[in-house]
Amino acid sequence: MKKIFAAVIAAAYLAALGGCSTQPSAPVDDQSTAAAAAAAAKPGTTTSGATTSGISGTSTGAGGNPLKDPNNVLSKRSVYFEFDSFVVEDKYKALVESHAKYLSGNRAAKVTLQGNTDERGSREYNIALGQKRAEAVKRVMVLMGAQDVVIETVSYGKEKPKREGHDEAAWAENRRVDIVYFGE
Amino acid sequence: MLSGRVAAIGPNNNVSNLRPLRHALAFAALALLTLASARAQLTIEIVGGAGTAVPIAIVPFDSEPVGPTSISYIVGQDLARSGLFKLVDPSGVSPRPVRIEDVQAPAWRAKGADAVVVGSAKPLADGRVEVRFALVDVVKNAPLVAMVYTVTPAQFRATAHKIADVIYEKMTGDPGVFSTRIAYITKQGTRFQLLVADADGYDPQTIVTSNEPMLTPRWAPDGMRIAYVSFESKKPVVYVQNLATGSRAAVANFRGSNSSPAWSPDGRTLAVTLTKDGGSQLYLMNADGSNPQRVMTSSSIDTEAMFMPDGKSILFTSDRGGSPQIYRLPLGGGAVERLTFDGSYNVSARPFPDGKGFAFVRRDGGRFQIATQDFASRQVQVLTSGPLDESPSVAPNGKLILYANEVGGRGTLAAVSSDGRVKQRLASQATDVREPAWGPFPRP
């Protein structure tokens, strides 16, 4: 069972990354991103650690909302990206997966994935880049069992920075997809 | 709009549609308006000029009040701000010339002037004013143009801009843009505003106020409508707003993101970027939002469409080659052509009105700069130094590019001539200003 699940996740990741593999020179500007993408593309890397310990979308605390429970990974809502990149990095796998499982297990739940970028570059191009990030997260969620129709992807581009500032620390925090549940 | 006519031909045409006001009262009202709008106003200063500015003397018009509301003063400010003219102090020439025949060429040449503007503002019995001006080439000692306008005092600024346009065109061969308007977005705290002002920054009018961001204001070719993107419903939606009536409609509000509106030259079609079918893709729709049709299908980002002036092709930004670059798509069929190759980030193409090239944003190292590229030669000219220059907008005469940059962590506007020689700064007080859009020539 566990093995099959891991294989599904590996397939999901390969498929999600497939969007970039058709574009050999995806807009990746620094080497760390390229390295991360390359690492993530290796089946051995993507399958390892792909277990989903206790994230079934059911209540974890004593009657608490798993989406709000700080001890539950579902309370984590942000996926961060490298500069100019829309690759969902390996380290966000468990996070994205847990939300996918929650959505598939709670048919009334709906999410908006809000893509964001740092302040550099064209406002309109950044809308598209933020959108591409949101869609990359959605692709992973759908491949992990979430319904396409319950996920809307939108982009704020660089228009709503979470952190004001003109340094890498601020930029890194703003290159982000937020997972927002309907009604939140 | 105001229409002038060549002097001394037939009776004065009445271009006034405002209730006649008593002269003095009107001046007082104008002065108050100036004070009231000074706060939110952009002020334009030249920070680098052309080496070959034409020395021109603007003689204060006969019977007009002295000061910044006078027509001759505004004409002079317009011309000086263009960077192509240098004002020669007209004082000391006595008697003050009013008509062409009063201009003594040798006296003006001695002051270093190549051209002289004279005129008068004669109050009429009905409260309107007859404004006359003449432009004299004192090098060749030849009159170049003379016009007369009959206007209300409330139309003085517009009349001055019209006169400056005539002088600019006579002296440079290109139409002036002093009678045009600009749109831009301000951000103050969490309050965003879409404003429209005269090209000299005067008389800013708030078009939309929102607590969510707005971007990409785009003038319809008729100058009566503006399309823009607003996040007021927590996602990007494209609106079109009528400036005269204030009415507006969401013309692209599909699932996903809706952005980057651009008008076709005939004003009937909007290009937009939609994500409703997955990915940021280009669509054409009627200006009311009906009948959206996907222009092409790609697996890449396609956005920032702009129509070429002939309406036959669009420029757009795509990452299909691995990095964001500018492409051209013929709308009548044919292959997409990549236009930019130098560097890994070339975006935000804005065609010049003559169709011979485009302005765009390029990244050089970490710096974002405004540049131009010629279609035929593919030659790139970098006009600004960055570091965060963006959102270029080309003046309708193709001679200036308005853009947004950042000074001291705050968004400001600037302009550069398309040959890179003249640089202007548009300063605003305590407000973040971005997303400039130069409006079309006023309809005659």
Image (cartoon, grey):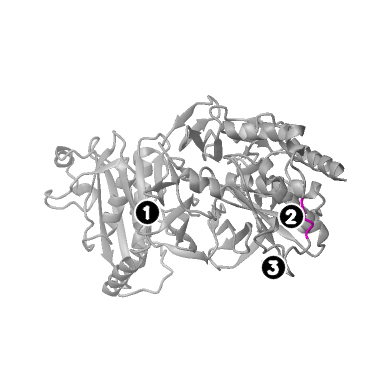
- Going by the image, does B35 lie left or right of B289? left
Amino acid type, mark 2: His
Question: Is the C-beta separation of discs 2 and 3 under 8 Å?
Answer: no
- Going by the image, does A118 lie left or right of A51? left
Of A2 and B155, which appears nearest the observer? A2
Please report, as a chain letter, where disc 1 is located: B
Residue at the image point whose x is 39% and y is 55% from the top:
B4
Element at badge 3?
Answer: loop
Element at badge 2?
Answer: helix
Residue at the image point whose x is 23% and y is 57% from the top:
B61
Please report, as a chain letter, where disc 2 is located: A
Query: What range is drawn magenta here?
Result: A53-57
- Quadrant location of residue A11? top right
Where does label 3 land, which residue? A183
Marked residue nearer the N-terminal end (2 or 3): 2
On residue B318, the disc is none
Element at badge 1?
Answer: loop
| Image spot of residue A94 (x, y percent) | 72, 48
Q: Is residue B375 above or below residue B8?
A: above
Q: Residues within 10 Å of mark 1 (few under 14, many from 20)?
A: many
Question: Is the C-beta separation of discs 3 and 1 under 8 Å?
Answer: no
Please report, as a chain letter, where disc 3 is located: A
Is residue A56 inside the magenta stretch?
A: yes
Same chain shared by disc 2 and disc 3: yes
| Image spot of residue B158 (x, y percent) | 38, 59
On residue B200, the disc is 1
Q: Nearer the viewer, mark 1 or mark 2?
A: 2
Where does label 2 land, which residue? A99
| Image spot of residue B83 (x, y percent) | 32, 42
Same chain shared by disc 3 and disc 1: no
**Majority secondary structure of the magenta segment?**
loop
